[in-house]
Amino acid sequence: MKVGLLVRIEAKPEYADEVEAMLRGAQELAEQEQGTAVWFAFRENATTFGVFDAFEDEQGRQAHLAGEIAAALGEAAKTKLSVPPVIAPVGLLGAKVSGSARVPTTAALRRPTSAGVSRPFSR
């Protein structure tokens, strides 16, 4: 892995649970992207989220930026985020990823939306 992206996402408080559900569901899409070597989504506090992903080359990074996850994040930015996401390209200096380090993507992990309905990732 040579290149990556570090994304900071600030949700409006009333949409924080929906942003979390969107990111949890995005894992399935990231797993289908051939050029995405690793993908992590995280929650820093009540309204701040982030994504870190890494790629073998610039072609993989650009394919990811043109993909469904980035498109959905752009859509969410229109209504659910307090500021546009900050997307920083990074060069990787080193990495260690264990093959067993995986967060399951099950419906049990999805949080209900404000309407009480569990919703997977969608654009």
Image (cartoon, helix red, strand yellow):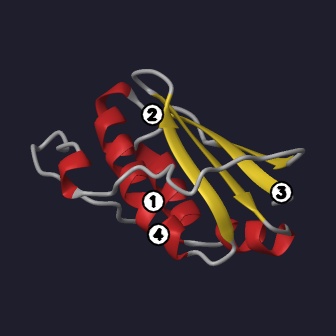
Query: Which quarter of the rendered picture does the N terminus lie within?
Result: bottom right
Q: Which residue is mark 4?
A: 29
Give the mark nearest the N terminus, 4 or 2: 2
Is 57 drawn above or below residue 111 in the view shown? below
Amino acid identity at mark 4:
Leu
Q: Residues within 10 Å of mark 1 (few under 14, many from 20)?
A: some
Q: Residues within 10 Å of mark 3 (few under 14, many from 20)?
A: some
Q: Give SS at disc 1.
A: helix
Q: Which residue is mark 1?
A: 27
Q: Residues within 10 Å of mark 2 (few under 14, many from 20)?
A: many
Amino acid identity at mark 1:
Gln
Give the mark nearest the N terminus, 2 or 3: 3
Q: Are marks 4 and 1 in contact (CB under 8 Å)?
A: yes
Amino acid identity at mark 2:
Ala
Q: Give SS at disc 3.
A: strand
Q: Are marks 3 and 4 in contact (CB under 8 Å)?
A: no
Q: Which residue is mark 3?
A: 3
Q: CA distance from mark 2 to mark 1?
A: 19 Å
Q: Which residue is mark 2?
A: 11
Going by the image, does 64 lie left or right of 70?
A: right
